[in-house]
Image (cartoon, rainbow, N blue to C red):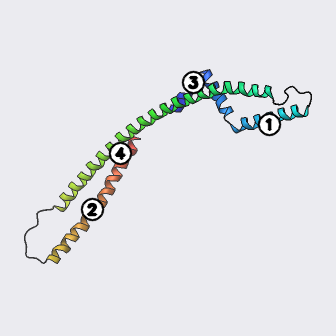
């Protein structure tokens, strides 16, 4: 279960109610409906449809808005406080995930370093590299010989890296 679901499941009835009221009052639908009601209220009172229950300057309408604001503000603030608490929980969960990822990355780097060291040891053993002897041979011939050894070692390293990678993938597949 993720942190969001845990948070949602642990809310009380009043917290759920406050969050729902805040989400409704903070929507375009609410604003549009409220605007239509206010417009109809004013038209009906100005034109005297039925009878004028709230004459201009619409004191009753102002009272209704004041009452709505008096209740809406604390409800919205409660919802924002819970949002802050939820953000803290999310940040803590992210921090724990980052710590675990950092540890796993460190382990992978250690494995890669060990594989690289093993590959280099195998290459050194296969090539049986020894100290060069002092000879009077032509420097160009020595360069060509060294180039051949270099290219052979690169081919060997690529083949070895492929084999090691395939072994590692097989191990990971078996773990799953």
Residue at 59% from the left image edge and 28% from the top image edge: 77
Q: CA distance from mark 3 to mark 1?
A: 34 Å
Estimate the x, y position of residue 148 in percent, counting from the top left.
22, 70
- The answer to whether residue 140 is visible is yes
Q: Point out the tag, 2 or 3, that comes first from the N-terminus.
A: 3
Residue at 81% from the left image edge and 29% from the top image edge: 58
Residue at 68% from the left image edge and 32% from the top image edge: 25
Q: Which residue is most to the top?
A: 13
Say the numbered circle drawn on residue 4.
none
Image quarter of residue 172: top left
Q: Secondary structure at mark 1?
A: helix
**What residue did someone put label 2 on?**
156
Q: Secondary structure at mark 2?
A: helix
Q: Secondary structure at mark 3?
A: loop
Estimate the x, y position of residue 145 in percent, counting from the top left.
18, 72
Estimate the x, y position of residue 87 in percent, counting from the top left.
51, 33
Badge 1 vs badge 4, beta-carbon distance below 8 Å = no
* Mark 2 surroundings: few (<14), some (14-19) or many (≥20) residues within 10 A: some
* Mark 4 surroundings: few (<14), some (14-19) or many (≥20) residues within 10 A: few
**What residue did someone put label 4 on?**
171
Q: CA distance from mark 2 to mark 3?
A: 62 Å
Q: Which residue is most to the front?
A: 57
Q: Point out the tag, 1 or 4, that comes first from the N-terminus.
A: 1
Residue at 31% from the left image edge and 47% from the top image edge: 109
Relative placement, left or right, of 167 versus 54 is: left
Q: Point out the tag, 3 or 1, that comes first from the N-terminus.
A: 3
Badge 3 vs badge 4, beta-carbon distance below 8 Å = no
Q: Point out the tag, 2 or 4, that comes first from the N-terminus.
A: 2
Residue nearest the observer in this picture, 88 or 81: 81
**What residue did someone put label 1 on?**
36
Q: CA distance from mark 2 to mark 1?
A: 78 Å
Say the numbered circle drawn on residue 11.
3
């Amino acid at each position: 279960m993720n942190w969001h679901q845990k948070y949602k499941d642990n809310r009380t009835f009043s917290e759920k109610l406050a969050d729902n009221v805040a989400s409704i009052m903070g929507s375009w639908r609410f604003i549009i409906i409220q605007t239509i009601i206010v417009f109809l209220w004013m038209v009906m009172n100005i034109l005297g449809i039925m009878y004028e229950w709230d004459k201009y300057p619409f004191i009753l309408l102002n009272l209704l808005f004041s009452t709505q604001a008096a209740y809406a503000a604390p409800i919205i603030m409660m919802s924002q406080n819970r949002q802050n608490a939820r953000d803290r929980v999310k940040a803590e969960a992210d921090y724990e995930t980052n710590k675990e990822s950092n540890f796993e990355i460190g382990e992978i780097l250690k494995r890669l370093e060990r594989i690289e060291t093993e590959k280099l040891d195998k290459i050194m053993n296969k090539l049986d590299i020894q100290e060069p002897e002092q000879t009077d041979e032509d420097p160009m011939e020595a360069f060509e010989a060294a180039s051949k050894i270099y290219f052979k070692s690169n081919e060997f390293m690529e083949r070895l890296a492929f084999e090691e990678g395939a072994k590692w993938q097989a191990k990971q597949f078996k773990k799953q």
